[in-house]
Image (cartoon, grey):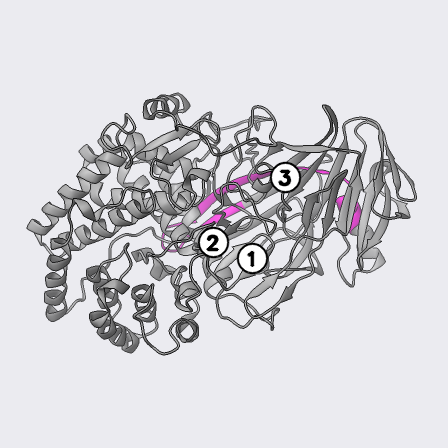
Amino acid sequence: MSVRLRAGAVALVAASALVLTACTGTAPETRTGGADRATGSASPSVDGAAQQRAVAALGAVTKTTAGSMRLADGLVPPTNRWFSGLVYGAAPQPVFPTPISWQVTDDGFAAGLPVVSATEKTIAGGAVQQVGLDLGADRTLVSAYDQVSVTVEHRKGSTVLGHTVLAQGSPLVSYTAERAQTTTATGPVTATGDGPDGTTTGTVAADGRTWGVVTSGDLDGSRIALPRGGTVVLFPVPDDATSQQVRALSAAAASPLQRVTLARSSTGSATDGEQRTALGYRTAARGDTVVVPQPGQGATGLDCTGLHYATITGAAPVCTGDVLRFAAPSLQADDRLDLSDLSSSERERLTAQVRADAGDVSEASFGADSYGGGKDLYRVANLYRLATQLDLDDVATGLRGQLVAQIDQWTDPDGCGVSGTRCFRYDDTVKGLVGQAPSYGSDEFNDHHFHYGYLLSAAAIVADGSDELVAKWRPVLDLVAADIASPEATAVFPELRVYDPYAQHSWASGYSPFADGNNQESSSEAVSAWNGLARWGAVSGSRATEQLGDWLLANEAVSAQRDVLDPDLRAFPGFEHTIVSLNWGGKRDHATWFSADPAAPAGIELIPMPAVATGYVAAGGKRQIARVLAEAVPEGDYAVQFGDYLLMYRALASGSEAKAALAAAEELPAEDIDTGNTRSYLLAWIMSRG
């Protein structure tokens, strides 16, 4: 989550390519911005002309919030990326391409391997300036990017001096001169020998850290004379590396990184298969390079050295290779609770509650902003689904009518003709949809997946089995889906706006105006968004959307359980909490944007508890659930914000805990039930676990 101050299957063919471009044994290229497309590309999966017609019909926003951007002409503005802070705002912000930090300086750039420390609530690894180059530059802009890497252009006035390439999962800082020049390193470079292809290797020390240097230029102390096309590659030397290991890493680092490609595939079924990711690290020489998987990522296909870099998620292995491969267990997208084992008394109790909650639904029950309004739709849609499951036809009919009337407004193909606020317009500068009652910075492209995931989820529930509703809503809802997760870059939307394939999670801040990088708070709302995307794909008959949703869902859920709900914190003994609720590029916090209440950090990682949540939120087991709840509700009083979701979480621990949670849920004050929830859904969830 970004700045949010809220109060309130069929088996697939093994390794079948669900690719963004064609797969031929190595990761295919998915370059954003049209810089250079992969050869052998598959036919586009998106009808770009139809998209353009649809957004034109919606109409344009009155004014964009983007301001001036440090971005090359012809590129789609990159919102919600780990490097978005380089593009937006008055000055470029530090960025954190794991495992290093990098920032623009007055004359060039500086990089560092963050020094990781831990306090009671924070694991910090902020930007440090250990090594860099003085280029004589006075401005930068992003000149190319893909899903994992970014290319920064350094200029003096209108003269292009050179380009630096950075990437998630790479410790390399790769600078290439656009013209002959002499650059100055931040300290004297000690030459250590000859590298491949006529390069020279060396080291430079600063702030207690030694960095390797590989250059095709001439070294003279701290000065490096570069011809046009000459290169300097910098990388932090891992602790305890031997001279032989440093030479091997220097050889792997000698060829500058150019870009990173992405391929995704799946194996098996939705219940016992895998969602696979392959990131291809492409260098000028098309050979092996230095690659750093995330701790616990389960990467394969690399030659790891036994060395590690300290990062805010733990000790990350230092490896060589050209493709980083990892997999996440498939997670069946689901929006239906299993009520088949309810006792007759439970069914009777739930029926009465559904009737009572349905009686409180009116036109005034639905908000106008894309977050609050989306949650309202989701709440009532779940209530409608329960009514259908309980054969309450009269209740279901009434709820369905109200939901259709509301979703009709949000999906008006002519924009805001029906409603002046419950609708979308198009920002042609930033290339995306903006709800016309902005909330939590949604007009700055904050939290779009959180907001729009609720709408997609609700629409999928209501339109399930109705060709008429699918046909009516699809023109706009497909745009909503593409805003947060287009499978490819088009003239209208960027590719995968919010999702970081290396980190395996999304970023929530649109413009990322922070010195600690981008951030995401509510991992659970991100998981819910991808569940909604997959369900909308299934209901609307779009296999491509469903498959993309499945891949995003599996990966975001893995990250949520590994990094948020049940993290391995043994490397950070100073950190005194059991979950990490606010993840940044440069730090991890046990905190929220909106509340200091002890229930908030856990609650924001559970909301809104769709049926699919049972597949990952309890991965830590009964012991972890007990530890989390001991922090969140130390007195055992669930009459707090998110108390409803905490009770649902408790119900996953065991049958006896589910019974205790059900009793507490019956007595929970109405004001402590979240606006995205009802007592009906709360009881149904817990009953289905009992």
Please say if 108 is above or below 275. above
Identify residue for label 3.
91
The Cα atoms of the two marked residues, 2 and 3, are separated by: 37 Å
Label 3 CA crowd tier, 10 Å (few <14, some 14–19, many 20+): some
Label 2 CA crowd tier, 10 Å (few <14, some 14–19, many 20+): many
What secondary structure is marked by label 3?
A: loop
Residue at image position (46%, 61%) is: 561
Determine which of the numbered discs, if any, sits on residue 328 in the image.
2
Residue 238 placed where, x, y %? Answer: 75, 58
Residue 582 placed where, x, y %? Answer: 50, 58
The answer to whether residue 9 of the structure is visible from this angle is no
Task: Name the outermost residue toward the right.
Answer: 220
The Cα atoms of the two marked residues, 1 and 3, are separated by: 37 Å
Identify residue for label 1.
298
The part of the chain drawn in magenta is: 249-277
What secondary structure is marked by label 2?
A: strand
